[in-house]
Image (cartoon, helix red, strand yellow):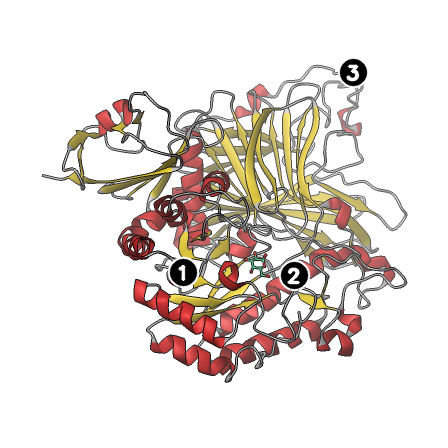
């Protein structure tokens, strides 16, 4: 198994297929981080020799040894207040008001299988496929213990971390910071890549050199957010898609988070990732414990593609759950961009009919089917069908749609409440707001206090009631604002700082209850598009609407960034009309199809309004997606060009057994009088031969990877390109 403890030296080594992670507890009980990289088969403690560094104070027990300093040594999980001035992983306020955490090694345990975390999503694995290391640290003065948990999936080269805080002292303490991951990289030069953005433009990768000091990517919005994503990559400067070292990490959490990276005075790097400390203060009474969310990470010495492929695999196979985890996803049609709020049962019926004719599997009825909801000012919380709009009721419409051979799906925004709603009129106290302060409104709406059991019960009854009332096969779980005005009437004043995390725990509890009760329903996450696109949500919803921006060109960029961490099957992606509703841009139908196919495919338009030619294209695209869907979702994903710096976006899916390859992409602008370009493929077997299934042409893998596929002469802008090649086994 992958975890080795060398008890005498108190050295711990985690060995996965291609990586090694090392730490050791030294003679003072300080748990030093020693190594994360390629397997070295040797304790790397010999590298950890430090001089006397000015203004780096010394551990009391070190006596006159001025070279031993917590401020210079790499720490496995940095405490606070006792002489390490870099960013901390954890901090505690004690009953006497002091703030300090001096963590020293106590004990370890190795357990079969992968640990789980009460109330929080976590990577799961069969006992035979994973092992857990627990290292207990203790702050002797207060009795606060921290159990560092490491889950190891050796075949996948994945390590997970979570910490358990236990108050074994007599007095209560307040946890002020409790990170999931602390990773010190004393050697090497690193750049970092993070994913920033905004509504309708999520997960834009940005890679820069580290500056001395602290750089941060975080969300204080109560959700993981459009603006930053809870994921990060540290790259060696020469790291490319196919070569070089990188360490990727993501947090399995859907609330506020903070990722900080510090380049210190000695050019050492520390990465800390976890709950956002500004929105966190958790009281631990004597005897109580607290579990942090989980961080998941990998080291690759063969570039970003390898890192992404490992993350795709671990998320698909060890995070997502339920019937649709690995199953082919239905091709769906969503009425949002076709009708917005302006629909009735006839309009929906006619959209369904034309979709069924073209081969669509499922109709999703979006916002506006419930309560008084003809615009976004009212109705949220009243999850009863609006029979003025849907005459005959929901059951009738669902039956009609199903009679076409299609499934039916429905939109909800459970966590919200409109002031103009029956729910608000009867339970104004269920909304999150601070007494005597006007709350911030966003899209006119307020949030429900998800920590209240009666709120969770109300939503459970309403949603499960609707799902039981008709044959509904899909739920789109939306969330259309950031959270502010944190206050809950159910928490005492001293514990209001627990609300942001308790909100997420309440959300997860409700999702767990509903997904358990309705295992056959496909849940798709959403938050104004991709504002809560994180691995926490993927534990409940195997796909998430990637962005409200359906423009094919913009989507190549959004999906490029998203693919760094998240699997293609997780990316909700639809063909919509032109001019595009977000940008006004006109792109060919084929291009919109190719872009949307690199995800969980669907349509978001009124198919009746398409020309006959476009309808034929749509029918062909659906057929294509059904044919290539298993390869697209189950294959190894390669980014073949960078849509931010190049005149194209190209990507490919290589079958796990290397038997076929699908290459897709878009050439943004055609240049006149220019020679044809070649596209170099990746991930093929150099000696094998591959045949283009359209032209019959045969190439070696080496030719395709080093010379490339000759691209067609393009005409016009945003030209679609697609190749399918099969390996010749004879
Ligand atoms: C959000 C979603 C959209 C749509 C609307 C409905 O913006 O991202 O897809 O569901 O809400 O109000």
User: Mark 1 = which residue?
Assistant: 609
Q: From the viewer's perspective, is 94 left or right of 578?
A: right
Within-10-Å neighbours for mark 3: few <14, some 14–19, many 20+: few
Q: Which of marks 1 and 2 is nearer the N terminus?
A: 2
Residue located beneath label 3 in the image: 54
What is the secondary structure assignment of the residue under circle 1? helix
The reply to whether the C-beta atoms of the residues labelled 1 and 2 are less than 8 Å apart is no
Identify which residue is drawn at 26% across, 22% down. Answer: 707
Circle 2 residue: 505
Disc assigned to residue 335: none
Residue sitting at the far bottom: 392
Choose between 450 and 516: the one closer to the eye. Answer: 450
Q: Where is residue 401 in the image (x, y as percent from the top left)?
A: 39, 75
Depth check, front residue: 608 or 8: 608
Q: Position of residue 192 (x, y in %)?
A: 58, 29
Badge count: 3
Q: Residue at x 70, y 50 (%)?
A: 221
Circles 3 and 2, Cβ within 8 Å, touching? The answer is no
User: How far apart are labels 1 and 3 at the CA level?
Assistant: 73 Å
Q: What element carries label 2?
A: helix
Image-quadrant location for residue 361: bottom left
């Amino acid at each position: 198994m992958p975890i080795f403890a060398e008890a005498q030296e108190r050295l711990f080594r985690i060995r996965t297929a291609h990586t090694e992670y090392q730490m050791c507890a030294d003679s003072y009980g300080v748990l030093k981080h020693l190594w994360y990289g390629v397997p070295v088969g040797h304790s790397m403690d010999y590298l950890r020799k430090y001089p006397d560094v000015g203004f780096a104070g010394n551990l009391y027990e070190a006596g006159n040894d001025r070279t031993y300093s917590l401020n210079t040594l790499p720490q496995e999980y940095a405490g606070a207040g006792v002489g390490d001035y870099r960013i901390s992983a954890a901090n505690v306020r004690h009953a006497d008001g002091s703030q300090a955490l001096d963590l020293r090694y106590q004990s370890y345990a190795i357990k079969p299988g992968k640990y789980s975390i009460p109330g929080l999503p976590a990577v799961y694995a069969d006992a035979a496929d994973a092992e857990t290391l627990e290292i207990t640290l203790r702050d002797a003065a207060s009795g606060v213990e921290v159990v560092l948990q490491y889950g190891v999936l050796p075949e996948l080269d994945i390590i997970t971390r979570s910490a358990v805080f236990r108050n074994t002292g007599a007095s209560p303490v307040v946890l002020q910071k409790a990170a999931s991951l602390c990773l010190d990289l004393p050697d090497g030069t690193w750049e970092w890549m993070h994913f920033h953005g905004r509504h309708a433009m999520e997960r834009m990768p940005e890679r820069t050199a580290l500056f001395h000091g602290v750089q941060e990517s975080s969300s204080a919005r109560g959700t993981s957010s459009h603006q930053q994503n809870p994921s990060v990559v540290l790259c060696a400067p020469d790291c490319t898609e196919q070569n070089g070292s990188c360490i990727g990490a993501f947090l399995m959490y859907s609330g506020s988070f903070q990722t900080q990276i510090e380049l210190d005075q000695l050019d050492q790097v520390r990465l800390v990732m976890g709950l956002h400390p500004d929105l966190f203060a958790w009281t631990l009474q004597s005897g109580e414990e607290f579990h942090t969310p989980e961080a998941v990470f990998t080291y690759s010495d063969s570039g970003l593609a390898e890192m992404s492929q490992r993350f795709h695999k671990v998320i698909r196979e060890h995070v997502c759950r339920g019937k649709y985890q690995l199953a082919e996803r239905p091709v769906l049609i969503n009425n949002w961009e076709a009708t917005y709020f302006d629909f009735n049962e006839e309009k929906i019926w006619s959209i369904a009919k034309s979709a069924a004719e073209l081969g669509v599997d499922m109709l999703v009825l979006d916002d506006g089917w419930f309560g008084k909801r003809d615009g976004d000012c009212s109705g949220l919380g009243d999850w009863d069908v609006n029979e003025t709009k849907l005459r005959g009721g929901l059951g009738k419409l669902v039956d009609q749609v199903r009679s076409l051979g299609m499934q039916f799906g429905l939109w909800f925004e459970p966590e919200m409440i409109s002031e103009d709603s029956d729910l608000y009129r009867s339970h104004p106290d269920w909304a999150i707001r601070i007494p005597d302060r006007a709350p911030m409104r966003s899209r006119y709406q307020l949030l429900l206090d998800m920590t209240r059991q009666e709120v969770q019960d109300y939503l459970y009854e309403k949603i499960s009631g609707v799902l039981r009332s008709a044959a509904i096969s899909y739920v789109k779980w939306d969330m259309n604002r950031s959270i502010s005005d944190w206050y809950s009437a159910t928490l005492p004043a001293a514990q209001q700082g627990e609300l942001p995390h308790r909100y997420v725990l309440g959300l997860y509890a409700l999702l767990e209850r509903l997904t358990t009760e309705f295992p056959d329903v496909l849940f798709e996450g959403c938050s104004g598009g991709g504002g809560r696109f994180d691995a926490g949500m993927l534990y409940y919803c195997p796909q998430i609407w990637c962005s409200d921006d359906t423009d094919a060109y913009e989507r190549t960029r959004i999906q490029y960034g998203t693919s760094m961490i998240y699997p293609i099957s997780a990316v909700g992606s639809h063909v919509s009309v032109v001019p595009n509703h977000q940008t006004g841009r006109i792109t060919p139908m084929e291009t919109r199809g190719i872009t949307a196919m690199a995800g969980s495919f669907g349509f978001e338009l009124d198919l009746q309004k398409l020309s006959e030619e476009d309808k034929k294209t749509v029918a062909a695209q659906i057929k294509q997606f059904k044919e290539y869907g298993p390869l697209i979702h189950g294959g190894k994903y390669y980014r073949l060009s960078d849509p931010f710096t190049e005149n194209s976006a190209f990507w490919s899916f290589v079958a796990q057994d290397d038997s076929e390859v699908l290459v897709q992409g878009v050439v943004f602008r055609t240049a006149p009088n220019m020679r044809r370009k070649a596209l170099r493929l990746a991930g093929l077997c150099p000696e094998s031969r591959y045949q283009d299934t359209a032209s019959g042409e045969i190439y070696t893998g080496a030719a395709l990877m080093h010379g490339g596929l000759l691209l067609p002469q393009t005409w016009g802008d945003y030209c679609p390109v697609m190749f399918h090649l099969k390996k010749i086994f004879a």
